[in-house]
């Protein structure tokens, strides 16, 4: 059995598509929305799955243990993402959440594997046979991965496309995927580093929301909003809670929002269902803002929201 090196995952930097002049120097992969995983295959029929933090998450995904025999006696360390797929074959993080955290409950993990199977998307090879590939360019690592022909009921090696970034981005948008990851063909694998050689490009959506409350910031920002509690109007005058947003604004915008919120305090929660938010302060639902976000959960919450701007030109009635 090979002694395999522990390797921390390389991380991508948020950004935009590479310029047209550099397009052919990048490979493009569909951005998956799941749990990052480094896969250790010592060549003895076993497999160890480690999360981004290095924790052993193997017991949570019993359907992936069969991967231990996929390469026979060849040792390998691979990089990938564990996902749960929806009916259209897209990764759905909300579905996966019910599988995460079951490391200490093997019986429940087995039941959930039958009910909601996980799938491992492999996208890099970091060690193979007797040598590390981390100092090998991405294009060669990718070729090594593809020659392994790892495809099964619970794992696969999705395609990477060289060049044609704008077309690939549009394809992922039309298909409802989260976005792309652009990887420089010459890039080495940088364990534990958030590298500019890998760029993640998310499809961002916008939504008008009504502010129904806020949570104070911490420390010197205790008198200012640390997060806004968002709602969307529904027929009949109901305001449905859609989550909180606490990023994306400047200090000046935070101060402006604070002044506006102070003019309309309320003792009553304006949402149809009171959100389980500690320290919430309610306001009359008058202010409308615009936020950016990636997707919605099945409960209607906005994922990865970021503040964009106030909408003084709109009232809550305009959003019905």
Image (cartoon, rainbow, N blue to C red):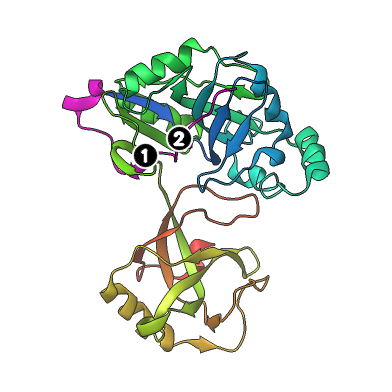
Q: Quadrant of the N terminus?
A: top right
Magenta stretch secondary structure, dominant: loop
Q: Is residue 72 above or below residue 118?
A: above
Q: Secondary structure at mark 1?
A: strand
Q: Name the residue: 67% across, 29% down.
A: 64
| 5 within the magenta span | yes
Q: Name the residue: 70% across, 23% down.
A: 66
Give the mark, 1 or 2, whose residue is nearer the N terminus: 2
Q: Is residue 314 left or right of residue 107?
A: left
Give the camera-side residue of 278 and 192: 192
Which mark identifies residue 222? Answer: none
The percent position of residue 116, horizontal first and vertical second, equals 74, 36
The percent position of residue 242, horizontal first and vertical second, equals 57, 62
Q: Name the residue: 43% across, 69% down.
A: 288
Which mark identifies residue 31? Answer: 2
Q: Quadrant of the C terminus?
A: bottom right
Give the camera-side residue of 40 and 238: 40
Q: Is residue 136 above or below residue 55?
A: above
Magenta span of residues: 1-25
Q: Is residue 51 left or right of residue 86?
A: left
**Residue under circle 1?**
200
The percent position of residue 108, horizontal first and vertical second, equals 81, 44
Whole-number angstrom distance, CA of label 1 to CA of label 2? 7 Å
- Mark 2 surroundings: few (<14), some (14-19) or many (≥20) residues within 10 A: some
């Amino acid at each position: 059995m090979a002694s395999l090196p522990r390797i921390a995952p390389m991380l991508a930097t948020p950004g935009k598509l590479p310029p047209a002049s550099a397009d052919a120097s990048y490979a493009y992969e569909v951005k998956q929305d799941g749990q990052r995983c480094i896969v250790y295959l010592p060549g003895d029929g076993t497999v160890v799955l480690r999360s981004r933090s290095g924790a052993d998450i193997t017991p949570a995904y019993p359907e992936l243990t069969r991967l231990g025999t996929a390469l026979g006696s060849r040792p390998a360390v691979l990089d990938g993402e564990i996902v749960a797929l929806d009916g259209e074959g897209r990764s759905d993080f909300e579905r996966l959440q019910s599988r995460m955290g079951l490391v200490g409950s093997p019986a429940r993990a087995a039941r959930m594997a039958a009910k909601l199977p996980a799938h491992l998307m492999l996208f890099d090879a970091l060690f193979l046979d007797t040598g590390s590939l981390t100092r090998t360019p991405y294009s060669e690592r990718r070729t090594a991965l593809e020659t392994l022909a790892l495809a099964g009921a619970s794992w696969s090696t999705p395609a990477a496309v060289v060049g044609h970034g704008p077309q690939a981005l549009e394809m992922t948008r039309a298909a409802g995927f989260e976005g792309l990851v652009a990887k420089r063909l010459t890039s080495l694998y940088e364990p534990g580093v958030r590298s500019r050689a890998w760029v993640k490009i998310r499809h961002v959506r916008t939504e008008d929301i009504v502010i129904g409350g806020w949570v104070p910031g911490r420390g010197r920002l205790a008198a200012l909003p640390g997060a806004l509690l968002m709602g969307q109007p529904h027929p009949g005058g109901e305001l449905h809670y859609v989550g909180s947003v606490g990023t994306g604004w400047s200090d000046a915008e935070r101060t402006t929002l604070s002044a506006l919120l102070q003019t309309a305090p309320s003792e009553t929660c304006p949402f149809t269902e009171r959100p389980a938010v500690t320290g919430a302060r309610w306001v009359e639902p008058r202010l409308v803002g615009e936020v950016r976000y990636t997707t919605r959960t099945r409960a209607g919450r906005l994922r990865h929201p970021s503040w964009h701007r106030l909408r003084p030109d709109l009232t809550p009635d305009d959003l019905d």
